[in-house]
Image (tube, grey):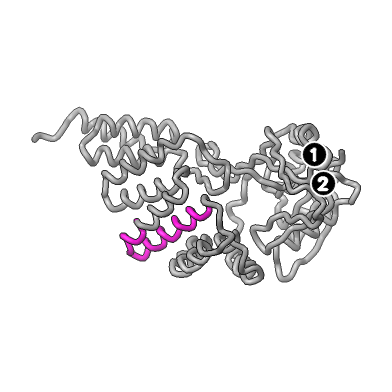
């Protein structure tokens, strides 16, 4: 089995050695540089990487990735697409060789997209970027995905346990182009529910509340928008936008719809609890954090966010308990929050304040 790693890059000199070391289990490494002005290309070539160069105008990720895939000779069997700010844990090649059988065409693996400040995992989901050399192309200007072009290929995506890819992004890199590219993507494929959802989310990130609400209501109306987790996320983003516009009751109703759509997710419960925390509605905070904490199995999709699985549920709960006069329970909840985020000075100070209040209760 011949395995290739391929990718695109621009001005990523700082990541070259770490990335090549991580990908060195492959039989060949291929990179399309899209206009680096630093020494990225020279460093890649010095490490034995096959480098192509192209200027892509107008910019779109799918075009760049398809050109990078074309750098891989057709006698390779399996391709792995990663980015220069990502790192495989050692042994990934052996796991592909063990799992990949004749007739397989695509595989998924575990991907940590973000890490918390204390080094613990943040957002974790499963990527599907291992694929057969022939019969695939990338599509969409941004949030690009693999598309089968050979109908004879198996449509099954196998799961390869044990492969771990970690993402360590350059936080100085701008994502300003994402909005324009998402608008382009939706204009090109207006019936694509996935990118319609992403566009609405991007409007929320930019504080364009009305555009977010309009776009995500359209997402929810689409006949192909059937994945409950993503539908629930659209409802949450609508709710948040409404709350930011001052429509409290309507926001609450959308959060409740998000919970009903995907009651197996912690996110909608915690989002509503956070809104109620912001309004000082402590009994509601306690109810919805309690609902969230009953969910013990963390899903493996990108919809699953880090905060609801970190200290936040216990943190909110501790504050609500303290404000309803249950100081001992508040301290216990705050300690559970601190276990999950031991470097959080605010939670530490909350515990000290609560312990002091417990020793010196107010006179009745």
Which percent across, then down, holds residue 90? 73, 33
Which percent across, then down, holds residue 177? 61, 65
Which image quarter holds the N terminus?
Answer: top right
Kind of element beneath mark 2 = strand
> Which residues lie in the magenta part?
230-252
Which percent across, then down, holds residue 156? 72, 45
User: Can residue 107 be seen in this snapshot?
Assistant: yes
User: Can residue 307 be seen in this snapshot?
Assistant: no
| Label tally | 2
Outermost residue on the top side: it is 359
Which image quarter holds the C terminus?
Answer: top left
For the point 74% across and 56% down, the residue is 147
Quadrant in the picture for residue 60: bottom right
Which percent across, then down, holds residue 56? 75, 67
Q: Residues within 10 Å of mark 1 (few under 14, many from 20)?
A: some
For the point 21% across and 33% down, the residue is 357
Marks 2 and 1 close (CB-CB < 8 Å): yes
Magenta part mainly helix, strand or loop?
helix
Residue that mark 2 sits on: 29
Classify residue 92 as left or right of residue 200: right
Relative to 105, residue 100 above or below: above
Sequence-first disc among 2 and 1: 1
Classify residue 14 as left or right of residue 309: right
Residue that mark 1 sits on: 24
Question: Is residue 78 located in the magenta-colored stretch of the structure?
Answer: no
For the point 84% across and 39% down, the residue is 102
């Amino acid at each position: 089995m011949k395995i290739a790693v391929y990718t695109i890059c621009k001005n990523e000199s700082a990541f070259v050695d770490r990335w090549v070391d991580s990908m060195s289990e492959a039989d060949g490494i291929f990179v399309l540089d899209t206009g680096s002005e630093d020494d990225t290309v020279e460093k890649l070539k010095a490490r034995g990487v096959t480098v192509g160069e192209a200027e892509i105008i107008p910019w779109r990720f799918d075009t760049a990735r398809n050109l990078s895939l074309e750098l891989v000779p057709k006698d390779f069997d399996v391709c792995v697409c990663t980015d220069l700010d990502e790192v495989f844990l050692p042994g990934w090649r052996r796991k592909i060789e063990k799992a990949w059988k004749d007739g397989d065409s695509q595989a998924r693996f575990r991907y940590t997209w973000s890490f918390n400040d204390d080094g613990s995992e943040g957002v974790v989901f499963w990527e599907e970027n291992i694929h057969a050399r022939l019969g695939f192309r990338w599509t969409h200007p941004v949030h690009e995905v693999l598309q089968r072009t050979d109908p004879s290929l198996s449509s099954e995506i196998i799961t390869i346990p044990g492969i771990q890819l970690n993402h360590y992004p350059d936080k100085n890199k701008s994502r300003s182009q994402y909005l324009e590219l998402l608008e382009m993507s939706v204009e090109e494929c207006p019936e694509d529910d996935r990118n319609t959802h992403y566009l609405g989310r991007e409007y929320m990130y930019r504080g364009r509340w009305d555009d977010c609400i309009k776009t995500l209501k359209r997402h929810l109306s689409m006949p192909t928008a059937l994945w409950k987790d993503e539908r629930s996320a659209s409802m949450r983003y609508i709710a948040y936008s409404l709350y930011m516009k001052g429509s409290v009751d309507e926001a609450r109703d959308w959060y409740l719809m998000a919970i009903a759509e995907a009651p197996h997710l912690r996110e909608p419960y915690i989002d509503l609890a956070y809104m109620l925390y912001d309004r000082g509605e402590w009994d509601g905070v306690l109810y919805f954090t309690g609902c969230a904490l009953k969910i013990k199995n963390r899903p493996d999709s990108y919809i699953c966010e880090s905060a609801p699985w970190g200290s936040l549920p216990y943190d909110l709960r501790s504050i609500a308990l303290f404000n309803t006069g249950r100081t001992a329970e508040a301290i216990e909840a705050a300690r559970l929050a601190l276990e999950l985020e031991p470097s959080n000075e605010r939670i530490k100070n909350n515990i000290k304040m609560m312990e002091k209040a417990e020793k010196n209760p107010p006179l009745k």
